[in-house]
């Protein structure tokens, strides 16, 4: 599925806003690399990560996927990987799939395998 199709499949505006926030945070960390190269030791990196974590938790609610993201953001150089975007994808992917009804083919139910 293309990203645009996936983005359009997000029904809730909070999910779309979370995607924008995550992609913007990752873009800032990559574009302004000299300010964020120190990882968790950089005040700019720490402030940005705490603000992004707070905003994403407010938009999407608490999810375990945010913990490894925060841990990865403390590692110098890990800011080159879009960890916030990956976390938001993981959280919203589960919610989009869980809302889709399961469509079964017509006919009798398949027998259980032995």
Image: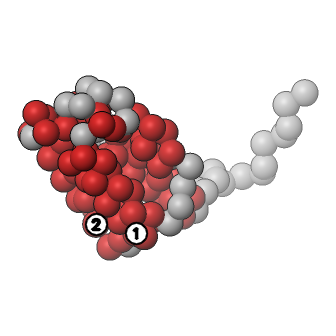
From the viewer's perspective, is residue 20 above or below residue 70? Answer: below
99 with respect to 7 (left or right)? right
From the viewer's perspective, is residue 95 above or below residue 44? Answer: below
From the viewer's perspective, is residue 44 above or below residue 60? Answer: above
Of the numbered discs 1 and 2, the one sitting upstream in the chain is 2
Mark 1: give few (<14), some (14-19) or many (20+) Cα within 10 Å. some
Q: Depth check: 1 or 55 in front?
A: 55
Residue at 44% of width from left, 63% of height from top? 57
Disc 1: which residue: 59
Say what secondary structure mark 1 lies in: helix
The label shown at residue 114 is none
65 with respect to 13 (left or right)? right
Give coordinates of residue 103: x percent, y percent.
Answer: 59, 56
State whether residue 106 appears in this view: yes
42 with respect to 59 (left or right)? left
Disc 2: which residue: 17
Marks 1/2 in contact by CB < 8 Å: the verdict is: yes
Give coordinates of residue 15: x percent, y percent.
Answer: 36, 65
Residue at 25% of width from left, 59% of height from top? 21
23 with respect to 100 (left or right)? left
Q: Residue furthest right?
A: 114
Residue at 35% of width from left, 56% of height from top? 50
Give coordinates of residue 14: x percent, y percent.
Answer: 36, 71
Say what secondary structure mark 2 lies in: helix
Q: Report which quarter residue 2 is drawn in.
A: top left
Q: Residue furthest bottom?
A: 13
Residue at 24% of width from left, 40% of height from top? 42
Q: Where's the C terminus, which quadrant?
A: top right
Q: CA gap, disc 1 to disc 2?
A: 8 Å
């Amino acid at each position: 599925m293309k990203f645009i199709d996936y983005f359009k499949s997000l029904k809730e505006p909070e999910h779309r806003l979370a995607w924008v926030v995550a992609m913007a945070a990752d873009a800032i960390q990559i574009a302004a690399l000299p300010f964020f190269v120190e990882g968790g030791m950089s005040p700019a990196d720490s402030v940005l990560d705490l603000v992004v974590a707070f905003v994403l938790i407010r938009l999407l609610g608490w999810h375990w996927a945010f913990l490894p993201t925060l841990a990865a953001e403390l590692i110098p150089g890990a800011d080159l990987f879009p960890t916030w975007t990956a976390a938001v994808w993981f959280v919203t992917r589960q919610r989009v799939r869980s809302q889709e009804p399961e469509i079964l083919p017509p006919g009798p139910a398949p027998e259980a395998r032995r």
